[in-house]
Amino acid sequence: MSVVDLIATADGRGLAASGLACLDRCVPLLGGDDEILRPLWANLTDDSDPAGWGPLVEQVRAKLDSYSGSDTDPDAGDAGDAVRLARRMLDTAPAGRSAAELRQWAEACSVASLGIHRLLDPAADPTPLDARRAGDTEGMPPLAAAELRRQLTVLEVVGARGAGGLRQALGLTTEGRRVLRAAVSRRARAAS
């Protein structure tokens, strides 16, 4: 199945995990540390209160607003576009955990995160993002291809295992965050 198909059939937890994982992998662009989104991940467990999601989203926004930001200049071409896309993921996080709100956010986060990885990948990709998300991976640049695989796997494991898949989803997200940091670092070295 494609990311588009999986998002279309995911339940609320899967949608929240999907959007959150995309945002979490890109949070270094916003100056956030590895732990900043942990309370939102914890809110997806079986014994959590879904009503706590909105206040936690606001807390994360406030914390990230207080950071000076990443080392990436938001006006610096593709890198600046990547920062703006990451910020949009955070800004559009819904206050509620209803499937309808989360489906739209998960879709937007999938597109934004894949776009960020494509912007930071040194290889050009002329294929539209929608085609990539629908399953056309022929000739896809490596950084974006790895991001697409992570998106698929998060949706699959949370879909199959529910709350039991959250640990694996978080592990994939941590790995993806390291990859993104390395890509940003390589890009900064090449620019200097």
Image (cartoon, rainbow, N blue to C red):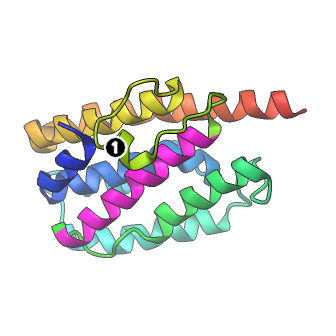
Say if residue 37 shows up in the picture: no
Q: Which residue is mark 1?
A: 133
**Would residue 117 be counted in the magenta stretch?**
yes
Q: Residue at x 63, y 49 (%)?
A: 29
Q: Is residue 91 above or below residue 10?
A: below
Query: 135 or 46, which is in the foreground?
Result: 135
Circle 1 SS class: helix
Q: Is residue 143 above or below residue 104?
A: above
Q: Residue at x 23, y 39 (%)?
A: 2
Q: Mark 1 Cα within 10 Å, few/some/many (few <14, many 20+)?
A: many
Q: Within the image, what quadrant is residue 40 found in?
A: bottom left
Q: Where does residue 41 sit, x and y in percent of width and height?
A: 31, 51
Q: Where does residue 87 sit, x and y in percent of width and height?
A: 57, 62
Say if residue 168 shows up in the picture: yes
Q: Main secondary structure of the magenta part?
A: helix
Provide the residue span drawn in magenta.
Answer: 100-119
Quadrant showing the C terminus: top right
Query: Farthest residue in the front direction?
Result: 126
Quadrant showing the N terminus: top left
Query: 178 or 49, which is in the foreground?
Result: 178
Query: 126 or 156, which is in the foreground?
Result: 126
Q: Amino acid at mark 1?
A: Arg
